[in-house]
Image (cartoon, rainbow, N blue to C red):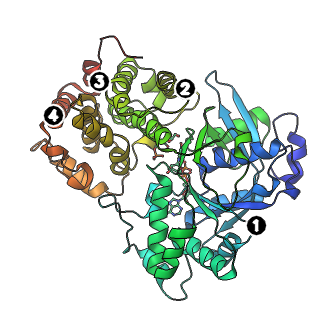
Amino acid sequence: MNTSTLGTLAGAVATPAYDRRRVRTGMVHIGVGGFHRAHQAMYADRLMNAGLGPEWGVCGVGVLPADRRMQEVLAAQDGLYTLVVKHPDGSLEPRVIGSLVEFLLAPDHPEAVVEKMAHPDVHIVSLTITERGYNTDPATGLFDEAAPDVRADLRPHAVLRSTFGLVTEALARRRARGVPPFTVLSCDNLHGNGDVARQAFTAFATLRDPDLGGWVAREVSFPNSMVDRITPRTTPDDVATLQDQFGIADAWPVVCEPYAQWVVEDRFPAGRPPWEAAGVQLVEDVAPYETMKLHLLNGSHQALAYFASLAGHRFVHDAGRDPPWSGFLRDYLDHEVSPMLPAVPGVDLGDYKRTVLQRLASAAVADPVSRLCAQSSALIPKYVLPVVRARLAAGGEVHRGAAVVASWARYAQGLDDCGHPLPLVDRQADRIRANAGRLDEDPLAFIADRSVFGDLVDQERFVVPYRRALTSLRERGARATLASLVDESPRPD
Ligand SMILES: NC(=O)c1ccc[n+]([C@@H]2O[C@H](COP(=O)([O-])OP(=O)(O)OC[C@H]3O[C@@H](n4cnc5c(N)ncnc54)[C@H](O)[C@@H]3O)[C@@H](O)[C@H]2O)c1
Ligand SMILES: O=P(O)(O)OC[C@@H](O)[C@@H](O)[C@H](O)[C@H](O)CO
């Protein structure tokens, strides 16, 4: 697929209804993975299909050498790719997305990346660089000044290689040239993602030059945003199906669920696309939406994933449709998560929870459980532990949250309930594995790691159900443990 073959697809699938030659780059996006292509680039495409915002085309940037394949595929396809929405009834809805009009690979062309961001037509630099990309110490929440990429980018005349080095240099050039700064828009799953980005970029700029750091803190806007759309990794089957069913030869399509939500704090002094017309919610305060999403959706993912892996479920829907899992999730959301949630403007939490559970039960999306079990040491503290702490503080029940932590501990021991090995993909893998390895002699060894769990090991109301769940997991397995936790009493709505 490329510009010259696009005409042959029109009619069979949706293609850009706008003239891509007239699209100008107004936004640079760092971290063009599956999610950006299923979400922010889709909203930009939707806007342009509505005849709006041709000045808001996207230039993708890959900062890591591993982004080379994306650069090569997009170059061969003139930036075009197919977004395949997988509906619960099994039908596929492909659409060719045209909003990515440029792509630069920073390891090859760092200077071009900096100049692109410094260009006066660019008003937003957005990010999906994963949670780790913000270079924040999980224990202290502070920017890690000692990281090798950061040290390297702070050297005089460095060939810039980190997001921080590249973005800060572009901001410094704009400042020197009298061009107003762009807005930095984080689209990663983080509490207060804009605040985290502000802290990280300000810290880096200050290390480079305290005066520049002060200017970044004062002049650059870092809106918070809540992002949502389940986007599993593309498989070879996805590529083949697109070719067989629709005749589209796309080397790297993206697949996702139908659901999509983007709630953005409306702080764009340099201007923004008229996103409202594409279904984006622009609000004053993102926090309630973000708390709701991270604890109900991402929290459910964590609550489901380790139990599912232990029981041999490969896909999220295998578990999402299985009564012990669906029952446990409903109880967890109703009795432990919901009480700590704020009121969310315009949202009926009962409906939202039902939708979450339906999304997790959709076989069409085929989201592998293994995707949710990676980097647990970053995810559990974000999605699960805040709920536990809030319930403890309120004097409420925590036995389901404690069981989720126990399921992670059991998972980290490395074998499922049939003795098959389980992978441990985690930047703290060595420590996590060592802690889990001592569980048989000391059941508290896992949660004694204060860098992950804080003082939970001292909280009797958490420790008792945690130990009980761990013992049950060892003696009876994941399925029976979950079944024993399902509440038969009537549910709040
Ligand atoms: N996949 C989803 O369902 C989903 C949904 C909502 C939000 N998100 C958010 O999007 C992020 C990316 O998810 P994805 O599915 O696109 O993953 P992906 O693996 O397809 O892409 C990750 C991208 O991040 C870049 N990246 C990783 N580490 C980086 C670093 N240190 N510096 C700069 N760039 C870096 C990679 O180069 C790549 O382009 C997630 O971490 C999450 O915060 C994902
Ligand atoms: O992206 P993570 O690693 O923070 O969490 C894994 C999944 O829960 C996440 O990717 C969800 O699929 C996504 O947040 C849905 O919008």
> Could you tell me if residue 421 is visible in this image?
no
Which mark is in front, 1 or 3?
A: 1
Label 4's element?
Answer: helix
Q: Nearer the viewer, residue 356 or 95?
A: 356
Badge 3 residue CB within 8 Å of ligand 2? no
Question: Is 160 placed above or below 314 here?
Answer: below
**Gap in angstroms between the C-alphas marked 1 and 4:** 56 Å
Q: What residue type is labelled 1?
A: Asp
Q: Which of marks 4 and 3 is nearer the N terminus?
A: 4
Label 1's element?
Answer: loop
Q: Nearer the viewer, residue 20 or 81?
A: 20
| Whole-percent x, y for residue 248 in the image | 78, 41
Callout 2–callout 3 Cβ contact below 8 Å? no
Residue pointed to by mark 1: 121
Q: What residue type is labelled 3?
A: Leu
Q: Earlier in the sequence, mark 4 or mark 2?
A: 2
| Whole-percent x, y for residue 255 in the image | 63, 39
Q: Which residue is drawn at 54% across and 26% down?
A: 363
* Residue 91 falls left or right of residue 373: right
**Gap in angstroms between the C-alphas marked 1 and 3:** 54 Å
Badge number at residue 482: 3
Q: Nearer the viewer, residue 11 or 285?
A: 285
Q: Which of marks 1 and 4 is nearer the N terminus?
A: 1
Residue pointed to by mark 2: 363
| Whole-percent x, y for residue 156 in the image | 51, 89
Badge number at residue 461: 4
Which mark is in front, 4 or 3?
A: 4
